[in-house]
Amino acid sequence: MPATAPVLRVGNASGFYGDRFDAFREMLTGGELDVLTGDYLAELTMLILGRERLKDPSAGYARTFLKQLEATLGLAHDQGVRIVTNAGGLNPAALADAVRGLAARLGVPARVAHVEGDELPGHEGALTAHAYLGGAGITACLRAGADIVVTGRVTDAALVTGPAAAHFGWEVDDPDDRDALAGAVVAGHLLECGAQVTGGNYAFFTGHDVRRPGFPLAEIRADGSAVVTKHPGTGGVVDVGTVTAQLLYETGGARYAGPDVTARLDTVRLRPDGPDRVEVHGVRGEAPPPTLKAGLTRIGGWRNEVVFVLTGLDVEAKAALLREQVEGALAGRRPAGVRWELARTDHPDAATEETASALLRLVVRDADREAVGRAVTGAAVELALASYPGFHVTAPPGKGSPYGVFEAAYVARGQARHTAVLPDGTRQEVPSPSEFREPAAVPAPPLPPPPAPGPALRAPLGRIAGARSGDKGGDANLGVWVRDDAAWPWLAHTLTTDELRRLLPETAGLRVERHVLPRLRALNFTLHGLLGEGVASGARFDPQAKGLGEWLRSRRVEIPEVLL
């Protein structure tokens, strides 16, 4: 990567542990790249890797990455593409050693470095405890000549900010570089989920061919602005809508705080730059917060699940009978958590038995395995010939399985020993920035004038608005946007927190925050506590809130005819 190159091309080939295996090869053969990143570490992944490490202390990293690298290391070397990944998970040193062994076996000269120090000591009872580090350790490794950099828990955006800072000479301690770093943070956030920015999971998917979307890349400039695009000829689409959707995903208010810089999302500007090209510019940066975000996982207890099938007539009465019978059988040993949910998937006068059936889901949780195992299994099985007509279940009840809990915390920066282990084995401590700022909420911007009154039609919100939703621990994030200036005043004045609660009754009683982002014609909501103890506990039907936005878009509201 020559320092004089005006553009750094950074691509991404993995948005989670289990993403499209061939994406590494596709990115290396599809067009020009300088750096290829791979993001493997979701909150749930840390719990999975923690359980693996309990069985084998040498484990704890994403083994898929090694298999992908085996098929592509020669390509990357021949093209001079550097690889940066957080696949190191809980054990980046072990993965770095494995990569060195792989390179030696393949006969490919590769200088391998890794970043460590994210693991936090002193958290008794936690299965994993890791701080989210920034990109400065990656920068140090690349400046020392690394071809491959393996990290543990860094922010997803750090996989992009680290290479960009190494290329352009940015420093996290230089106030003059904050805007550029913030721009790279936004670019990193846009790339981190892979095909989600190239048409995957997109609200308006019917307008595009998204059967096999290509993976994204960002052409980053020295001022931190970037163009998000994809390799020529690959599937999917990159437009202002797909970029807006990903920008809102799993973010909150106007200040997007990270360990190196706080990016101001209310300053982001998007504009088309040709087919499948969107320029991202104008991002302002501020000093980062004095603390580091940390993710703690632990085994929360045991859970079990039974799904009963209710077919044909009297579905509500059948559900009531079954619930009363099961609750009675559990009265002497009731689990600490019991959740029932009736999904009316049945249709009247249905042509198939499946479409004539509803599903009654029972989820139980307790610290004692026996309370969710034999007790629940017995209560369900023993009713097979003594309950509602047509009794059957989707699968035999199990003995129960452990579930995990993710908790976000904030720790002093000194608790994490951010260290870059360079290709020659030298250990270089990575200092923290010297200036900090608490990321206080930005005052709500003024709303546009309300739309003029006129005739309206009752129609699904999704006729004019897009949405994307996701999880952050036990909270859900829900971003909603419109595609033109004419619809923005209507959305801003219509979709209040009270209206959101009306449209999504599950949110009644929850604390709901609304953030207004006029430059994106968007609202971003945080629904506190909707997901309980988080995805790993598995209590909610949609534990990661992935479908929450589409549920909202299906709800009917009064929409001005002129917008339709």
Image (cartoon, rainbow, N blue to C red):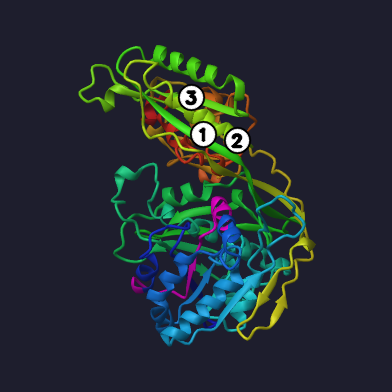
The disc at residue 174 is none
Label 2 element class? loop
Which residue is drawn at the image coordinates 47% and 55% (left, top)? 193
- Asked if disc 1 and disc 3 are in contact, CB closer than 8 Å, the reply is no
- Asked if disc 2 and disc 1 are in contact, CB closer than 8 Å, the reply is yes
View extreme (left): residue: 351
Residue 360 picture location, percent across and down:
42, 24
Label 1 element class? loop
Disc 1 residue crowd, few under 14, some 14–19, many 20+, Cα 10 Å: some
Residue bearing mark 1: 540
Residue bearing mark 3: 379
Q: Nearer the viewer, mark 1 or mark 3?
A: 3
In the displayed structure image, the side of residue 322 where residue 433 appears, left or right: right
Instruction: Say what amino acid the circle numbered 1 marks.
Output: Arg
Closer-to-camera residue (17/193): 17
Look at the picture and state if 21 lies above or below 344: below
Instruction: Say what amino acid the circle numbered 2 marks.
Output: Gly
Label 3 element class? helix
Residue bearing mark 2: 532
Which residue is drawn at the image coordinates 40% and 60% (left, top)? 277
Q: Earlier in the sequence, mark 1 or mark 3?
A: 3
Can I make out residue 319 in this image?
yes
